[in-house]
Image (spheres, grey):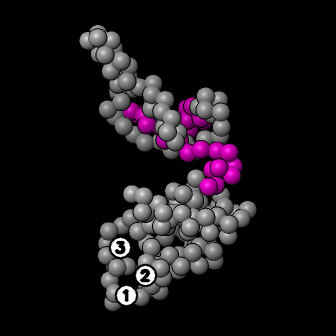
């Protein structure tokens, strides 16, 4: 959805410049806003002309787990006044990409068949950081159909050490 990315880019860049040294801290509240913004009922409420942007602002801030800093409040008001609530998840994604580029880090999604405890995750993080050559922010998602092992996605790079992938490789080798 290129149009949404085009709409989100100026908001992400402006917030990145405004956040300055606290850009990493802004990621937390921006991700929380993006999670709230995907709610269909909230979008219907925001799209209803009977309700003002300030009323929508009150509902969103009331739902958040933590209070927004002043910069977050101003940012949310601007997004709502311009009718860009649907672009908020994409803004958060682009903002995180800007912060990662500044810090020389990347986001990584680790798909695992089973829960990974904190010690194993820390060990996996150090191995993956050596493999990919940069600091990684890991997010774990369960995917039971992997059977065992992990599948790691960092941007457009994929490292698949799952049992499912190995079985697929064996299947291809046997049928070739």
Q: Quick check: marks 2 and 1 in contact, CB under 8 Å?
A: yes
Q: Judge whether residue 117 can be spotted in this image.
A: no
Q: Is residue 62 left or right of residue 18?
A: left
Frontmost residue, 2 versus 28:
2
Numbered tag placed on residue 56 in the rendering: 2
Numbered tag placed on residue 51 in the rendering: 1
Q: Residue furthest left?
A: 175
Q: Residues within 10 Å of mark 3 (few under 14, many from 20)?
A: some
Q: Say what secondary structure mark 2 lies in.
A: helix
Answer whether residue 107 is magenta in the image: yes
Q: Residue at x 59, y 44 (%)?
A: 106
Where residue 138 sits: x, y (%)? 55, 42
Q: Residues within 10 Å of mark 2 (few under 14, many from 20)?
A: many
Where residue 124 sits: x, y (%)? 57, 31
Q: CA distance from mark 2 to mark 3?
A: 9 Å
Instruction: Find the magenta span and give its range.
Output: 98-127
Image quadrant holding the C terminus, namely: top left
Q: CA distance from mark 3 to mark 1?
A: 12 Å
């Amino acid at each position: 959805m290129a149009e949404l990315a085009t709409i989100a880019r100026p908001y992400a860049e402006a917030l990145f410049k405004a956040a300055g040294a606290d850009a990493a801290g802004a990621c937390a509240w921006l991700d929380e806003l993006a999670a709230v913004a995907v709610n269909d009922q909230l979008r219907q409420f925001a799209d209803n002309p009977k309700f003002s942007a300030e009323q929508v602002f009150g509902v969103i801030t009331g739902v958040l787990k933590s209070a927004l800093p002043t910069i977050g409040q101003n940012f949310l008001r601007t997004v709502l006044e311009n009718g860009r609530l649907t672009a908020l998840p994409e803004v958060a994604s682009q903002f995180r990409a800007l912060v990662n580029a500044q810090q020389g880090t990347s986001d990584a999604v680790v798909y695992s068949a089973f829960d990974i405890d904190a010690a194993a995750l820390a060990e996996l993080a150090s191995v993956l950081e050596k493999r990919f050559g940069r600091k990684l922010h890991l997010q774990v998602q369960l995917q039971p159909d992997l059977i065992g092992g992990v599948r790691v996605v960092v941007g457009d790079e994929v490292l698949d050490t799952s049992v499912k992938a190995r079985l697929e490789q064996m299947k291809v080798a046997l049928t070739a």
